[in-house]
Amino acid sequence: MKHIFEFVKGTLAGQNQFASGGLLLMIVGAIGVYLRSLPMRLWSWLICQTTMMLTVTDDDTAFEWIKEWFLEQKFLKRVRWLDLDTSLRGDEAALIPAPGKHRFWYCGRPFWVWFSRKDDTQGWTPRRLESLTFRTIGRDPDFLKQFLREVVACHKRKIRLASYLYQYSEAWRYVWCVHAARARFGHSEIGREGASG
């Protein structure tokens, strides 16, 4: 380190104006780049200190619960980017937020949601990876726990007794689902897809 300092000192004080001018320009440029990135670093630090984040990936059961919770929310009527999902309500189609950034208000606080979807092509079977990341203002984890309690309560209201039929043909494939609500009205759906008796 001492040799580098001596070299820089000798170059700046020496007779070679080209080298001393270039080195001075490089130092001023480095300081300028650092100062230009400083506001962004301060903003990131401020956001990190004043907000909370919650991430749920699609390999967790809570991912489906949150999608069920979305269906009960009034702000869903104002969302413009939507996905069609038939896994939530059996045979019925449901519109849920599509991948991207969404905003909504919950208990008087703004929430930002990032829904990301990636295709994982590595491994034996390609699969789609999805995640939901929520961010809100505040530092109290009890607020996020309250949010999660509402999501769980929504899921418990939606639980229905259901039977699922899968068929194996080189891989397991979902064929049919019978919900208890339909069975009460005397419908029997046994057998192949589309069969009813």
Image (spheres, grey):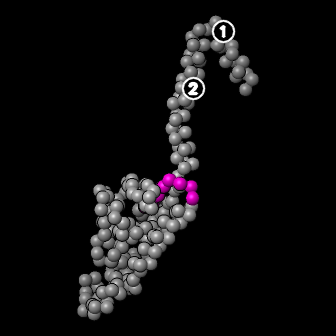
Residue at horizontal 48 percent and vertical 63 percent from the top: 56
- Across and down, in percent, residue 125 comes to 43, 65
Q: In this view, does 160 lie above or below 98?
A: below
Q: Does the magenta stretch include residue 133?
A: yes
Image quadrant containing the N terminus: top right
At mark 2, the secondary structure is helix
Residue 146 in view in this figure: yes
- Across and down, in percent, residue 189 comes to 29, 88
Q: Is residue 60 magenta?
A: no
Q: Residue 107 carries which label?
A: none
Residue that badge 1 annotates: 14
Residue that badge 2 annotates: 31
- Residue 181 or residue 47, whichever sits in front: 47
Question: As shown in the figure, which amino acid type bears the numbered disc 2?
Answer: Ile
- Residue 188 or residue 190, whichever sits in front: 188
Neighbours of disc 2 within 10 Å: few (<14), some (14-19), many (20+): few
- Residue 34 or residue 18, whichever sits in front: 34
Q: Give the range drawn in magenta.
A: 130-140
Residue 79 lies left or right of residue 18; in this view the side is left
Give yes or no for contact between labels 1 and 2 (Cβ–Cβ under 8 Å).
Answer: no
Residue 75 lies left or right of residue 9; in this view the side is left
Q: Is residue 104 above or below residue 159?
A: above
Q: Is the magenta stretch mostly helix, strand or loop?
A: strand
Quarter of the image holding residue 3?
A: top right
